[in-house]
Each structure stands twice: as C-alpha cells, then as structure tokens.
Image (cartoon, rainbow, N blue to C red):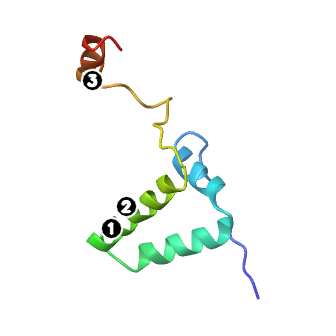
Amino acid sequence: MRVTKSVSLDIEADRDILRWLAAQPNASEAIRLAIRAYQGRGSVTLGDVYQAVRDLERKLQSGAVVMPDTEDWKEPSEAAAALKALGL
C-alpha cells in the first residue's frame, strides 16, 4: 500500500531543491533517501564529505563540466583584477 503526501516548494526560495529534483531519475526515491539520511545523523561526517568528493570526481571523469550558477555568481574582484593584469 502506498501513501501520497504533497509538498509545496517556492520557485525562488527553493530553486536549488527544484534543480536537484529535476536531475533525479526517480524523484520519490531520491526524496526518501534524503529524508532517511537526514534522520540518521545529526551532522555531516568526514565520510559524507569523502563520498561527495568521490562522486564529483566520477562525474568529472565522465565528462561533466562544473559551472557556477551564472545568476548568482559574481567574480571576485581580486580574480577579475588578476585576469585583467594578464590581459584576459
């Protein structure tokens, strides 16, 4: 037997969650796993960080490209000055 629960997300405030959900092959399973992970620990562990780094490494090796969210990203002024000094 299944139970269906509804949840509301704000298109602006929850943009990160909506993006994450859109990238999941099975949103219901991803949500269940995320809730269980949240319930199972009080804080992020070194193992969590290591696993996240390994996952990112795997994605990069398979050709993924990491780019900042251009809407929210601002180039640090020091970096801009250094690039300008290099003529870039």
Question: Is disc 2 surrounded by few (<14), some (14 to 19) or many (20+) residues within 10 Å?
Answer: few
Q: Tell me the CA gap for discs 3 and 2.
A: 25 Å
Question: The disc labelled 2 sits on which kind of residue?
Answer: Val
Corner quadrant of residue 82: top left
Q: Give the amino acid at mark 1.
A: Tyr
Are dots 2 and 1 in contact, CB under 8 Å?
yes
Q: Quadrant of the C terminus?
A: top left
Which residue is identified by label 1? Answer: 50
The residue lying toward the viewer, choosing from 44 and 85, is: 85
Please provide percent x and percent y for residue 54.
40, 65
Camera-side residue of 16 and 3: 16
Check contact, mark 3 vs mark 2: CB within 8 A. Answer: no
From what the image shows, is residue 12 above or below residue 59? above
Between the residue at mark 3 and the residue at mark 1, the CA separation in whole angstroms equals: 28 Å
Quadrant in which residue 32 is drawn: bottom right
Who is closer to the viewer here, 77 or 2?
77
Residue found farthest to the bottom: 1
Q: Give x and y (percent) for residue 77.
A: 27, 20
Identify residue for label 3.
Answer: 79
Task: Assign the N terminus to one quadrant of the image.
Answer: bottom right
- How many C-alpha atoms fall within 10 Å of the one at disc 3: few (<14), some, or many (≥20)? few
Looking at the image, is mark 3 or mark 1 earlier in the sequence?
1
CB atoms of marks 3 and 1 within 8 Å:
no
Q: Please tell me whether residue 37 is drawn above or below residue 83 in the rendered image.
A: below
How many labels were placed on the picture? 3
Identify the secondary structure beneath mark 2.
helix
Residue type (three-letter) at the residue carrying disc 3: Ala
User: Which residue bears the numbered disc 2?
Assistant: 53
